[in-house]
Amino acid sequence: MNAKQAAAYKAVGYIQDGMIVGLGTGSTAYWAIHYLAERVAQGLKITTVATSESTTSIAAEKGIKVSSLDSVEYIDIDIDGADEVDSMLNLIKGGGGALLREKIVAAASREFIVIADESKLVDVLGRFPLPVEVLAFGREHTARHLQRLGCRPVLREKDGQVYITDNGHQILDCHFNAIPDPALLAQQINAIPGVVENGLFVGMAKKVIVGYADGSAKELG
Ligand code: 5RP
């Protein structure tokens, strides 16, 4: 078992019969879906909600039915990855472009469990460029507002094309290098007209499961 698998496997151990489960996005969350699918095949009964179209497809391929978020009142446990995790369990997310739905699903969850390999642990957030989902309309103006907060915003592209999120928006990856006050920055970014959501998840994760290369996993929080 590699580090991502170890973290995902431990997190899936928290899922019980009858629960409503949030399915994250990314290569670590992939393994959570994989292990969940194994348990579903063995008879576990759960309802799931996905954080992206790609996760919906992966879950369907593995035999997990996905429901819409609005068909459930809340989510028992949401399991998702992260790009960076600090010692307060604040996160940067959105490397996979799903930050908006990921934040909505995490906010609808009674418990938000983050799974990550040890490379994601940092003292200060911000070395990983902070993804900010923005409207296409006036994007350059929005980028200038972001720049005034001390970053270098870079428009995300994929295969030579502007990257478009599941919600039809674009992403500016904001190079801050260091984010000493994530709560303040998250507020400042979301106050900019044209910003849809930012990838700072402040005070949302109560448990982070860290996987290690030797196949072990440790809980923080
Ligand atoms: C997707 C995310 C992912 O959780 C994050 O990018 C981590 O991905 P991975 O597990 O592949 O390293 O936020 O939007």
Image (tube, rainbow, N blue to C red):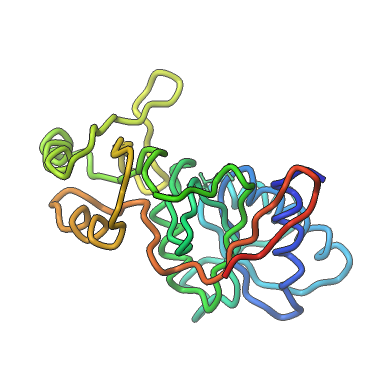
Q: Quadrant of residue 134?
A: top left
The residue most toward the right is: 42
Residue visible at 77% across and 74% down? 45
Q: Quadrant of residue 197?
A: bottom left
Q: Is residue 202 above or below residue 210?
A: below
Residue visible at 45% across and 20% down? 159
Quadrant where the N terminus sits is top right
Residue 171: percent from the left, percent from the top? 32, 39
Residue 97: percent from the left, percent from the top? 44, 43
Q: Is residue 129 above or below residue 36?
A: above
Residue 156: percent from the left, percent from the top? 35, 31
Residue visible at 72% across and 48% down? 212
Q: In this rendering, would 48 be left or right of 138? A: right
Q: Nearer the viewer, residue 120 or 57?
A: 120
Residue 138: percent from the left, percent from the top? 13, 38
Quadrant where the C terminus sits is bottom right
